[in-house]
Image (cartoon, rainbow, N blue to C red):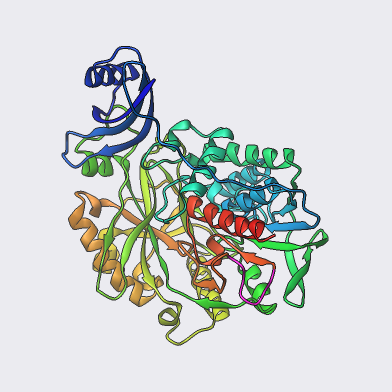
Amino acid sequence: MGFKSITLRLPTGYSEQQLRHRIGKMLRIRNFSFQVEHKSLDARQKPKVSWQLRVGVSSSEIREGEPREVKELEIPFKKRRFPVVVVGSGPAGFFAALVLQQAGFSVTLIERGSEVKTRSRAVSHFERTGFFDAKNNYAFGEGGAGTFSDGKLTSRSKHISQEKQFIIQNYIKAGAPEEIAYLSHPHLGTDNLRKIVKNLRLHFEDLGGRVMFETMLEDIVVKKSKVTEVVTSQGVLPSGALFIAPGHSAYETYRMLIRRGVPFRTKNFAIGSRMEHRQEIINLAQWGHENLPGLKAAEYRLTSPADGNHPVFSFCMCPGGTVVPAAAYPETNIVNGMSYYSRNGQFANAACVAGIHPDELAGKTVSPLEALERVEQLETAFYRHTGNYRAPACSIEGFLQAQNRYFAFDSSYPLGVVAAPLWELLPAPVVKSMQAGLTDFVRKMKGFETGNLLGLESKTSSPVQVLRQPNGKSEGFENLYVVGEGSGYSGGIISSAADGIKAAMGFVLGQ
């Protein structure tokens, strides 16, 4: 039995029969099996958009060759004597907990919110009534913020191939579509994620792991640079090691850690607003067609040097998606985006943000605590402007000209929008850069000026970063690890999960 990897191009609406025919014709063979290794969309020659595939073919008619051996993540198992506590059930926390449990530790995973079914009901109630639930919202609850997102599985992080494969394999076992193993831009969709995070949790529990929902991390007990106990709203847990994956919104957790001597520093982050367009506008700009067979909805990724001071870029693009009220705390107003797996909504949305340092945002050198406070003040100011969770909004053209102009209020945002001068609500340096960046975006994509800007996007990344060793261990501590987006070293599902895995593996191999 021989093997050969080939590359071929097919129309967007190709069938499996067409694919088999092309493989047989290219290799001049009749009896074979095949597996798609990689699949990416080529839209460079509009309107001739096509799929480019790399396919591994096995056949007795092929004389030589073997499939590439993929090295898997090896988790050494032995029965361990002491308990480990993991805080946060987002990608970083969950996959750290899974690795530790598979390595033989007795792991307790605590989550401040509820399990995903209860959380989903609370989010739906919020969108219908505007009643905010501090325990279950778009930031907190089973699966973390990623549960209510587009579920993108792309990452720019390097040297995480084994970790990424481990993540993908576990997602597929938990019900994710197998295509995520080979698509160049895979995504899960929030509807799949709500099922997947539950199945992952059940798998973790089958391995002997313990999950405590509606359990808030309140404090840690430190003795001689070691965390010995974890104080929670449900009592005190002994801990031989503590992994904290706070996500991008758990500011009280940051403050507690700083109070307990965990070192943090400020860093560049990004803020702005969310852009929303009719999806057919984006499809036309990217494909040259309003729709194409075999494709869901067009994506985009835009960057601009802007005014030369603060780079501007799109972030977390949600094709056929929804702009959502993503407040983590009462009387704060921020937005984010999510999509279902089908990506069949009428609108496309993405953040438009400018990179900035907290010092410039505050107009002075600030501590990590002051940086958090400055962001909170901005989120509160947006809430005060509307007096509720409606989103302040304006047209892109109005923002560029810094004047109120009529714009269509038609939007996917469930709680309604209010015409507002976003150029006055956002910090001046950010506004200047966003105006320059959006001017570039309009020049790059036909019809882009027809979109609107909604609300405040302040959670693309954290304004603070924990000081830690290469293995993820916090400086000055022997058994404390801060991982994921909340650590300031990762962002997105894959890179955050990989960060949790790396820290967990470092701890396992050190025991």
Left or right relative to 110: residue 249:
left
Left or right relative to 105: residue 435:
left
Name the image quarter holding the C terminus: bottom right
Is 7 above or below relative to 107?
above
The image shows residue 492 at horizontal and vertical percentages of: 48, 54
The image shows residue 152 at horizontal and vertical percentages of: 44, 46
The image shows residue 329 at horizontal and vertical percentages of: 61, 63
Is 507 within the magenta? no
Is 229 above or below relative to 16?
below
> Which residue is more in the foreground, 252 or 12?
12
> Which residue is more in the foreground, 183 or 82?
82
Residue that lies at the very extreme toward the bottom in this rendered image? 364
Q: Quadrant of residue 228?
A: bottom right
Q: Residue at x 74, y 51 (%)?
A: 105
Please tell me whether the stretch drawn in magenta is mainly helix, strand or loop. loop
Magenta range: 472-478
Q: Quadrant of residue 174?
A: top right
Name the image quarter holding the N terminus: top left
Q: Is residue 248 visible?
A: no
Q: Residue at x 31, y 33 (%)?
A: 54
Q: Residue at x 69, y 71 (%)?
A: 478
Q: Quadrant of residue 10?
A: top left
Left or right relative to 199: residue 296:
left
Q: Is residue 311 visible?
A: yes
Is 373 above or below relative to 67?
below
Is 496 above or below relative to 4?
below
Residue that lies at the very extreme toward the front in this rendered image? 64
The image shows residue 207 at horizontal and vertical percentages of: 73, 40
